[in-house]
Image: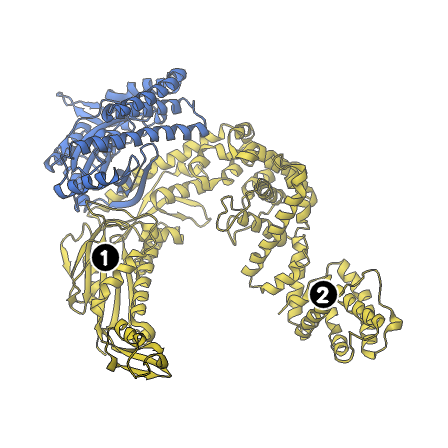
Amino acid sequence: MTATPTTKGATFQGLILALQSYWSEHGCVIIQPLDMEVGAGTFHPATFLRAIGPESWRAAYVQPSRRPTDGRYGENPNRLQHYYQFQTVLKPSPDNIQELYLGSLQALGIDPLVHDIRFVEDNWESPTLGAWGLGWEVWLDGMEVSQFTYFQQVGGLECYPITGELTYGLERLAMYVQDVDSVYDLVWTINPDGTPITYGDVFHQNEVEQSTYNFQHADVTHLLSSFDFHERECAKLLAANLPLPAYEQTLKASHTFNLLDARKAISVTERQRYILRVRTLTRGVAEAYLNSRAKLGFPLAEESIRLEALAALQENK
Amino acid sequence: MAALDFLVELGTAELPPKSLSALSKAFSKGILDGLKAELGRDADKLLADITLESFATPRRLAVRISSLLTEIPGSVNLVQGPPIKICYDADGNPTKALLGFAKKNNTELDQLSERGGKISYAQQIAAKPIAAILPSIVEKSLAKLPIAKRMRWGSSRIEFVRPVQWLVMLFGEQVIDCTILGATASNKSRGHRFHHSAELTITTAGEYENLLEKAYVITSFAKRRAMINSQVLAQAKKINGTAHIEADLLDEVTGLNEWPVALTGQFDQEFLSVPQEALILSMKEHQKYFYTTDQDGKLMPYFITVSNIESKDPKKVISGNEKVIKPRLADAVFFFENDKKTSLAARTAQLKNIIFQKELGTVYDKSERNSILAGFISELIAGSKEKAQRAALLAKADLITDMVFEFTDLQGLMGYHYALHDGEDSEVAQAIYEQYLPKFAGDQLPQTKTGLALALADRLDTLTGMFGIGQPPTGSKDPFALRRATLGVLRIIIEKQLDLDLKQLVTLAVEQHSAIKPTDRAAIIKQVVDFMLERLRAYYDDRGIKVDTYLSVAALQPSKPLDFDKRISAVQHFRSLSAASSLAAANKRVANIIAKQTVSSTVTVDRALLSEAAEIELYDTLLQLSTALKPLYAAGDYQAALVLLADIQQPIDAFFDNVMVMAEDQKVQQNRIRLLSELRELFLQIADISLLN
């Protein structure tokens, strides 16, 4: 579609601001990105950990995401090793969650009577997070612009209440709204003199250098030993009842694994073993986190669910 | 009897498109089964006047039953109790047995009566309004839907395919008061998500689809499917093309729309440089687009998409879709161009890194085994050994190309294109494509000799390997699809009329596996050959050939499938002869007699010991026939042989009518048995006719 300067999504940052203000108006905690390397917004504690246990939670945030194997040295118009996701989580998922989502697209100036918007079955599973959910990918005139998931299990634990997760692929959505063919041509914002600052101006050099690092320079020997280190550290922190720092060690282990993967340092059979090792960590963290929240009495839970959850935990002891 | 129309509509968030039709069918069937169970014996009579209609869209499953009786009629249920003699004691007082029976049925003694020596209770079952039981029937049907994974939502423990949003339960004009899957029944439905966002009140079941159509929802799956089909055809016509509409894609697209509007988009001509199958798959799998071809059958640079909106500006929807398909096709071009930079021959080394099966080695190891086997088979069918070996070595190299990595379905086909590009022999290239044929029941078979040899070798290697490491298919578990592979081998040999012996092929395939110890070979060869012959049963069953025909041939264990097939045809023809059933019976009788005796095969019939006219006639006929049959057996002309053998019917029947086999004189008896045994041997050259029913 042709973007007019008045459209809220006309610039990349305008798109982010519009989504933030929309979800802010709908009662979300607008939280800031996690300051660590993660592969997707789901890894942010505001999603992964908050999806565990009986407590209610509504949050929205941008999450820079890194997937080393997707790097293309800045030469592919669609593939990046560093990109942005906009993530909204609503727990318990409200009955009108789809309508809320559609409202956010309208807030970006997308008219559902002009464009063909569809919810197409898509089921999600993350072996490393011990998590799965059912939902849709959302199509806008045939383009997948969001992922929509009802978490059923996280960290090996059954979810209750259910978290509804909406993940917007910001670059894709922006490329659509701005009608450009290359991510690097996206207008990030407009200078005071009216000239554009593009996504390329902001990130192209980063893509070239980071791809080079990921594929060629990352030190395999050191990475292998740091994976072991983060795994040990996580176990130690879990023993000390510190689930939040332990979770960060899990994220570091996970990103280390991704880097090793980009360096093709892990064989097919080894790969499966590493995934299982990360899963063991996330499961440990999930249980420790649930217990730590239980000790606090699940302060954010709705009363009847809170009592039910505490009683259930008591029974299991 | 009074009757009303019943409507149930379960409103949901968007359902999985591929299973929508199956869900709808199961929902309707579940409701009908539930009604039948409630109505009991008279169900079919009571439901004779109903019409059941199913409706299914991405956001609803609905069923309407017209002219459903309003109540289940009352009935009498006779409950049988204890025998009358134990019901009263000597003084005529009721015993515990009688009192207990009355209590169990919650009734008084004066309600009981005697029937056929037993106490019985005529339980009156009152008429009951059907509306009262409809909610539980609907609920049970929903609980039984074939859903791979159920999900929960919100803070509810309820599970369904996707979140449930509303429920309409209407009987006549009355809402049936109930709550199912968390939704409370009403007469309020919803229309199209964008075209009609207001609620919709349904007054009677009869107006359902018309009312919904005004709210931009075509509720009938079949009607929507037909609309999409004709819209897509019409779009294709506009660009002078032919639309290709595959049933599975049409079903899926029908499951993605409530208000289908077909639109045509375009892509750059330059993409057509890529093998069209890759482009077609890309359009179909990722975008659910239909494709078109021109008069020469060539792919046209257009796609037809079916949107779910009557857009205020369809051009925007089209240009949006064009934007999506472009990078997808660009990927295909990129993969194709990039793949061509490395020849298949150069790629084969990389196959050493791909495990075929842990104990059977890498895909490279398999290619080497295939190569030896394919070379051997090719020689047997008068093909080129060298070409078959070359094709086998290159055959799996396309598995590591980007294109096949992205579209697994293109394996073989991309190998064909890349082989031609590499300058390989055209038959070698063709064989690389043909190695996977037939892919499914009824699929085409390889055309070239090299392709035939490779297709057989690849399957035989997998088959013998998996049996060799002790992993034959068991029950429903057949992860390497060995049953299908076997059927492929049999079809190729029979339908391509190849004179090949399974024993010989399997032996050679087994010998190539280092995982199979030489001492185990004989046992595994037998196991595999038996398994393959057993699959012929399914092969013939599919062709409508009676199982006893199969069994009569299988009893002889002929290990050449083509020879097996000739025998089957002969027996088939034999069964059409008037003498057939009487000869089958005679053979059965002979087989039974022989089974009880030990017949020495070295001693022949002694003409001098034959005294009865009937046995002499049988013997002479037998002698004549053996001479006449010899050339027919040698030529494998089993049909003519059986026709000839049918002549023996009268002598046999006469023999059994007039001759006592179990004569008192042992020598005579033995001689007669020998005579029958020789007769049977003559039939057993073709099939065991005694097994025919």
Measuring from the top left, give residue B183's x and y in whole percent: 18, 55
Please indicate, yes or no, whether residue A51 appears anywhere in the rendered image: yes
The residue that disc 2 covers is B595
Residue that appears at 15% across and 67% down: B174
Residue that appears at 15% across and 66% down: B203
Measure the C-alpha gap from mark 2 to mark 1: 67 Å
Residue neighbourhood size for the residue with mark 2, other residues' Cα within 10 Å, grouped as few (<14), some (14–19), many (≥20): few
Check whether the beta carbons of the residues at disc 2 and disc 1 lie within 8 A of each other: no
Q: In what quadrant of the picture does the N terminus of chain B appear?
A: bottom left
Q: Nearer the viewer, mark 2 or mark 1?
A: 2
Residue that appears at 57% across and 57% down: B539
Measuring from the top left, give residue B26's x and y in whole percent: 33, 59
The answer to which of B379 and B63 lies nearer the viewer is B63
Point out which mark residue B10 bears: 1
Point out which mark residue A141 bears: none
Q: Is B603 displayed left or right of A309 in the figure?
A: right
Chain in yellow in the render: B
> Dot 2 lies on which element?
helix
Task: Give amino acid for label 1.
Answer: Leu
Task: Give amino acid for label 2.
Answer: Ala
Please indicate, yes or no, whether residue B209 appears anywhere in the rendered image: no
Measuring from the top left, give residue B72's x and y in whole percent: 25, 74
Instruction: Using the rendered view, name the quadrant where residue B207 is placed.
Output: bottom left
The chain identifier of the residue carrying mark 1 reads B
Looking at the image, tell me whether mark 2 or mark 1 is earlier in sequence order: 1
> Chain A colour?
blue
> Dot 1 lies on which element?
strand
